[in-house]
Amino acid sequence: MLPLLFSLIHLAVQESPTQILSIIPAALIEREGRHLVLARDNRRLLVLEDGSLIASFSVAVGMPGWETPAGEFRVLNKILHPIWEHPQSGMQISSGSNNPLGSRWIGFYRDCKGRDAHDGNRWLTIDGCVMAGFHGTPHRWTVGRAVSHGCVRLFEEDIETLYRLVKVGTPVNVLQ
C-alpha cells in the first residue's frame, strides 16, 4: 500500500511539459539542436532539442554570495568518477559514496579571478581558478535548494542520465 501511495503522490506533484516550458523564454525553447537551460530561481534544469523537452531535473544551485553563474556557456569537460579537491586545503576525496561530486562531473564554467566570500559557516578565500558544473551528490536533501558554492547538484540517478545526454560543447544557458 505504501509504495502505491508514494507513486500517486509523486505523480500528483509532477509538472507537465507545458508547465515546465512556461518558465523558459521562447527563444531558448525554439533554439536548434540539443542544449541545456538552467532556471536558477525554479531550481530546474531542462534538456531541450529542436523545441522539444527531452528531460527535466530538479537541482540545487549556488547559495547567496556563491550564486551559480548566469549566462551562456558550453560543456567544457565530462569526468566519470571525479576526484573532489577542497579549494583551500587541497585535501582530496576519491570516487565513492563520500565524494561531494557524486559519480559524474560536467563542467560548464571556469574563471581564474578567485573567490572571497562567506558561505554561511565560514569565510572562504580561494586563490586561482574556480569551476562550476553539474554533478551528483550524496546529500539528497540539498536538491531543490540554494546551498552549493556555485555548482548545480542533481540526484545521482539524474546526473547519470544527464551525463549520457550531453557532450563536450553542448550549449548551456543559465537564467538569472
Image (cartoon, grey):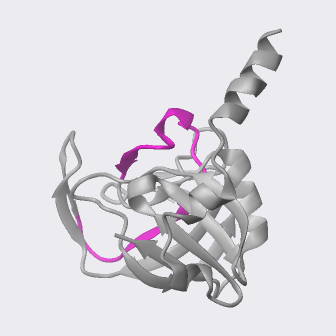
> Is residue 76 in sight in this rendering?
no
Residue 62 spot, x, y in % from top left: 36, 56
Q: Is residue 14 above or below residue 65?
A: above
Taking the magenta stretch, the answer to whether it contains residue 131 is yes
Residue nearer the viewer, 144 or 83: 144
**In this picture, which residue range is highlighted in magenta?**
126-148
* Residue sitting nearer the eye, 42 or 97: 42
44 in relation to 142, above or below: below
Instruction: Please indicate, yes or no, whether residue 6 appears anywhere in the rendered image.
Output: yes
Q: Residue at x 31, y 82 (%)?
A: 112
Q: Quadrant of residue 36?
A: bottom right
Q: Quadrant of the C terminus?
A: bottom left
In the rendered structure, the answer to whether residue 162 lies left or right of residue 61 reads right
Q: How many marks?
A: 0
Tell me, yes or no, whether the highlighted magenta stretch contains residue 1.
no
Q: Quadrant of the N terminus?
A: top right
Quarter where residue 56 is shown: bottom right
